[in-house]
Image (spheres, helix red, strand yellow):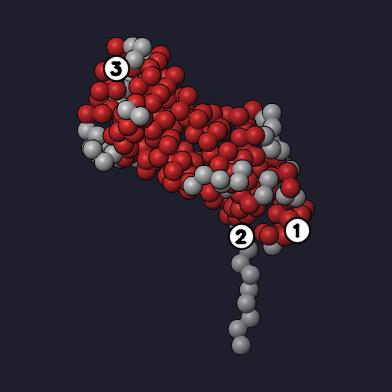
Amino acid sequence: MRTGVRRRMGVEERRQQLIGVALDLFSRRSPDEVSIDEIASAAGISRPLVYHYFPGKLSLYEAALQRASDDLANRFVEPREGPLGARLLRVTHRYFDFVDEHGPGFSALMRGGPAVGSSRTNALVDGVRQAAYVQILSHLDVDTPPARLELVIRSWISLAESTALIWLDGRRIPRRELEIQLVHDFAALAAVSAAQDAEMADLLRGMLADEPTDGPFSELAGRLVALARG
C-alpha cells in the first residue's frame, strides 16, 4: 500500500493559496464576517501560520483585493472590433459576471469593509476605474479627451458601480436588462453632452457610424422615438 505524503508548499505558493482562500470567503460574505480562524481552517493550516505569511486580516484582505481588482480591470479589455454598442454590451456582461461571482466582497469594497480608510484599498479601486476609463477611451479612438468626454465616461463608470450595488440588494431587476440599460445609459450621457458641444457631437456621430439597426444604440433611439410619438 502507498502512504500519501503531503507536499510542503513554498512560501509564495502558500501565500497565493491563502489569497485564493480569502478571496473565496470574502466573495461569499462580507469581509467583516470572515475571521482569521475561518481562513486558516479553509486553507488547512493553523492560525499562527496565517500570521506567518500575513501580519493580519487587513493585509490579507488587501492582497485578495489586489487579485480581485486585477481580475475586474481585465473585464474591461475588449478587442476593438465591431460596433461600439456591441463591445460595451460584452464589457458590461463580463462586469456583471464579476459582480455575480463576488457579490458580498464587491459590495464591501464599494461601501467600505475592514480596509476602510486604507490608502492601499482606495488606490486599488481607483486603479480599476482608471483602467476602465482608459479602455473606453481606446474604443473611442481618443488620445486626449475633451473635458466633456471625460465627464461622460467617468460618470458612466460611477453609474455602473451604483447599478451593480443596487442590483445586488435583492436582484429585483433581471441582470440582462440592466446590462442593456447601462449601454443605453452610455449613449444617453454622450447624446446629452453632444447637444451642448460640437466636439462631442462629432464623437457621437463616430460612435453611431457603424451601429447596426439591431444594435443597442439603435434600439435606444427607436424606443425614444416611440415614446415621443406617444
**Amino acid type, mark 2:** Met
What is the count of numbered marks?
3
Quadrant in which residue 120 is drawn: top right
State the image coordinates of residue 10 (x, y, percent, origin top left): 60, 56
Q: Quadrant of the C terminus?
A: top left
- Residue underneath mark 1: 46
Q: Nearer the viewer, residue 93 or 175?
A: 175
Q: Is residue 22 visible?
A: no
* Nearer mark to the viewer, of 3 and 2: 3
Q: Which mark is residue 9?
A: 2
| Numbered disc 2: secondary structure | loop
Q: Which mark is residue 201?
A: 3
State the image coordinates of residue 178 (x, y, percent, origin top left): 46, 41
Q: Report the residue at 58% width, 38% height from top.
A: 166
Q: Nearer the viewer, residue 187 or 47?
A: 187
Quadrant in which residue 62 is drawn: top right
Q: Nearer the viewer, residue 63 or 6?
A: 63
Circles 1 and 2: CB distance less than 8 Å? no
